[in-house]
Every structure is written in structure tokens, then in C-alpha cells.
Image: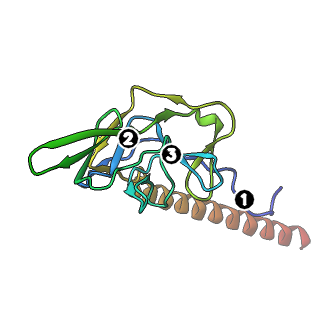
Amino acid sequence: NLGTGVRVQGTARIDTQGSLNTTGNSLDVALDGDGYFQVQMPDGRIGYTRAGNFARSPDGNLVTSDGYPVQPGIIIPPGITSLTIGSDGTVSAIDRGPTARNVQVVGRLKLVALDRATMVRGGDGLFRSRGGEPTADANLKVVAGALEESNVNSVGAMVEMINLARQYDLHMKVLQSADGNAQRANQLLAS
């Protein structure tokens, strides 16, 4: 198919873990390992994300930055002065009263491993499983007060893009040279 232009052969997802950035926010959590948090999408299905910038909704639910509740649901009681999230995903509410400090476990984030072959990424950035149930992964650890940064190496991507542009220029010069040689050959044969 010469002369039909170029087309995308495919895209690839980079699944390496990004570096962790400490934020100090008690509701920011990052996963240390290859796994996902479960959230409930608006249509009721389960979605999966690595984004751990959670918040408390007006009704007390622990939700993603897009407002999707984590699954299983975690409700933060009113009057809580602070929250802690343990490395196993346990969410504890702390109420510092005038005479005592009360700690109450309010839930646990479900940390799951997905088979990459069955994952589909939606337009909303959430992953869906198109077959196979995700499994709880006890090896995953939660890092509280941190968020995972992008795993894209922008310098490496720029170097690769410059290299590809140079290869393209080289191929264009080869094609122009071959075209010029063909024109000269035609002129010699015609005379």
C-alpha cells in the first residue's frame, strides 16, 4: 500500500508505577504496587483507578475527585476531627474530645489486582474489567499522605520524538534522491 499515507498501528499503555509525591493531606493515598482502588460509577458498575486523591462528600462518603464513591462504601461520621489511612487501607476516624481521643475504624479500601488483558480504559479515565473478577491483593500497600505522579518520562519521550523526526527526514531524502535518479534515467532513455 504505497502512497496511502500513515496510520496508527496501535497504542500502548505504560503500566509502570510513577514516583510518589508527599502531599500531607490525610485523604491523599497512593498505591505501592500493581493494583487499583474500586469505585462505583454513576451507572452502578464498578470502575478501577489508581488516583487516590479522595475527598469527603457532603453526605460523609469517601469519594474520588470526580465524586465516585469508593467501594465498598466508607462513610465518615460527622464531628470527626481527623482521618488516618493505614498501609493496609484501613480508614480510621479520630475524634479528639476534651478529655479523650476516640479512634473508630470506619472502613477499609479494597485493593485489587486486575488482569491487564481484561482491562478496558474508559473515556472518564477509569478502568473496567471485561471479564474475570478482580482479586483482593494483600501485597498492595497504601502510602497515606501521598499521590502517585505521572509515569511518563517526558525527557525520554522528547528524545524519542526528535529521533523519529530525524529518521523521517532521512527517509524523505532517500525517496527524493531515488525520484531524482528515476527522472534522470527516464531522460537518458528518452534521448
Q: Residues within 10 Å of mark 1 (few under 14, many from 20)?
A: few
Which quarter shows the N terminus?
bottom right
- Foreground mark, 2 or 3, reads 2
Q: Residue furthest front?
A: 99
Q: Which image quarter: residue 23?
A: bottom left
Is 71 on the left-hand or right-hand side of 43? left
Name the secondary structure under disc 1: loop
Q: Which residue is mark 3?
A: 14
Q: Which residue is mark 2?
A: 31
Q: Identity of the amino acid at label 3?
A: Ile
Residue at 69% x, 39% y: name it. Answer: 130
Name the secondary structure under disc 3: loop
Image position, residue 64 (x, y; %): 45, 55
Distance from disc 2 to disc 3, alpha carbons, whole Å, reads 16 Å
Is 49 on the left-hand or right-hand side of 41? left
Q: Earlier in the sequence, mark 1 or mark 2?
A: 1
Which quarter shows the C terminus?
bottom right
Is 129 on the left-hand or right-hand side of 70? right
Is 116 on the left-hand or right-hand side of 142? right
